Image: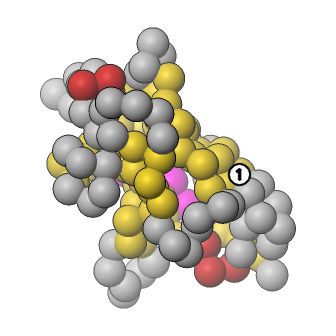
Amino acid sequence: QVQLVESGGGLAPAGGSLRLSCAASGVAISGTGMSWARQVPSKNVEWVAGIYKEGSEGNYANSVKGRFTISRDNAKNMLYLQMNNLKPEDTARYYCVTDRTGRGDYGFWGQGTQVTVSS
């Protein structure tokens, strides 16, 4: 049974930083791409960042490029999202997702963690 558990969300000021973590079980993240996606109530899910199973270079949505960094620790089976220079428009629920291509080909989802950025 695949489980993805996100943590690290919370309240941050504009310009601040947060680091999201995703603990995976039931799946080896070294064998699959992984992504972070986010959603604001009443809006569609937005793909934020992804990483393919081979290599460590991430792919990013234009809205977060240069500010967010996706990384993983295969030994710990953990996925991370370092978010710097946060903006109020980054406010959303963030989800850790298995992703076959690392570019939005979603599989299993976590429960999400809320990020709120104050202006």
Vertical relation: 41 (above or below) 95: below
Task: Pinpoint residue 16: horizontal percent, then vertical percent.
Answer: 82, 61
> Which residue is denoted by mark 1 in the rendering?
18
Is 89 or 73 nearer to us in this picture? Answer: 73
**Span shown in magenta:** 110-115
Q: Is residue 102 left or right of residue 114?
A: left
Q: Is residue 111 within the magenta segment?
A: yes
Q: Is residue 47 left or right of residue 105?
A: right
Characterize the local packing of mark 1: few (<14), some (14-19) or many (20 or more) Cα atoms within 10 angstroms. many
Q: Residue at x 80, y 72 (%)?
A: 14
User: Please, what secondary structure does the residue beneath circle 1 have?
Assistant: strand
Vertical relation: 69 (above or below) 72: below
Vertical relation: 68 (above or below) 47: above
Q: Is residue 105 left or right of residue 81?
A: left
Q: Is residue 18 within the magenta segment?
A: no
Q: Residue at x 41, y 38 (%)?
A: 5
**The C terminus sits in image quarter:** bottom right
Task: Pinpoint residue 114: horizontal percent, then vertical percent.
Answer: 55, 60
Task: Pinpoint residue 87: horizontal percent, then vertical percent.
Answer: 71, 75
**The N terminus sits in image quarter:** top left
Can residue 66 be seen from the camera position used here?
Answer: yes
The figure's colour scheme reads secondary structure
Residue 90: image quadrant is bottom right
Task: Pinpoint residue 41: horizontal percent, then vertical percent.
Answer: 41, 81
Is 62 or 46 nearer to us in this picture? Answer: 62
Q: Is residue 27 left or right of residue 93?
A: left
- Residue type pointed to by label 1: Leu
Can residue 13 be seen from the camera position used here?
Answer: no
Most extreme residue toward the bottom is 42
